[in-house]
Amino acid sequence: MSANSNHSNDMTEIREGDIVFECPDCGKSMAIEAAGAGLMVPCVTCNRQVQVPIPDANTPEVRIPGRASAPVIHPNGDPHETIRQLDAALAYANEQTDRLVAEKEALQERRAFLEQLRMAHTERLQQLANEVQQMQDTLDRIGILLTEIRTERPM
Ligand SMILES: [Zn+2]
């Protein structure tokens, strides 16, 4: 896999989804297909190994779960047909309810997980603060000792 040169007069080389990046050494603008994210590629101009940037993982594609459109009820005078349509509508409503309940449970699980993570971080921060405080105390004691040693030393 190699990076394409990105001359201003042949922008057609860049396809949608390509990662456009610059050589940190010579500033050469290059483009590579999305699959090249994170790879080391030689700069097309100065041959320096350049790491292809990885697109921001925090902005994934938003995927809306597939949902069939609600069945339409067309009463046409045939009671059997109307009942069939109502059954279909009911089945659809039940499916949607199940889906929403599952989604809600997944969100609750996620929230519980994030809460645990937050608490673990808070605990760790407290530990670190205690350690820093202990270190500070030790430094203070060393400082006092050094002052004492200096003042006790006969000049
Ligand atoms: Zn370069």
Image (spheres, helix red, strand yellow):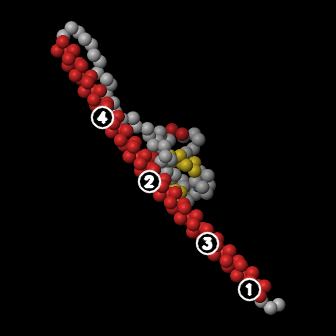
Three-letter amino acid code at disc 4?
A: Asp
Kindly tell me whether mark 1's CB lies below 8 Å from ligand 1: no
Secondary element at image label 1: helix
Of 41 and 129, nearer the camera is 129
Residue 27: image x %, image y %? Answer: 61, 52
Residue type pointed to by label 3: Met
In the drawing, what numbered circle is on residue 135?
Answer: 3
Camera-side residue of 39 and 63: 63
Residue that mark 4 sits on: 98
| Residue in the picture at 57% in, 68% down | 131
Looking at marks 1 and 2 on the same chain, the residue that comes earlier in the sequence is marked by 2
Give the residue drawn at x 70%, y 82%: 145
* Residue holding disc 2: 116
The image shows residue 70 at horizontal and vertical percentages of 31, 23
User: Which is closer to the viewer, label 2 or label 4?
Assistant: 2
Q: Which quarter of the figure has residue 89?
A: top left
Residue type, mark 2 in image: Gln
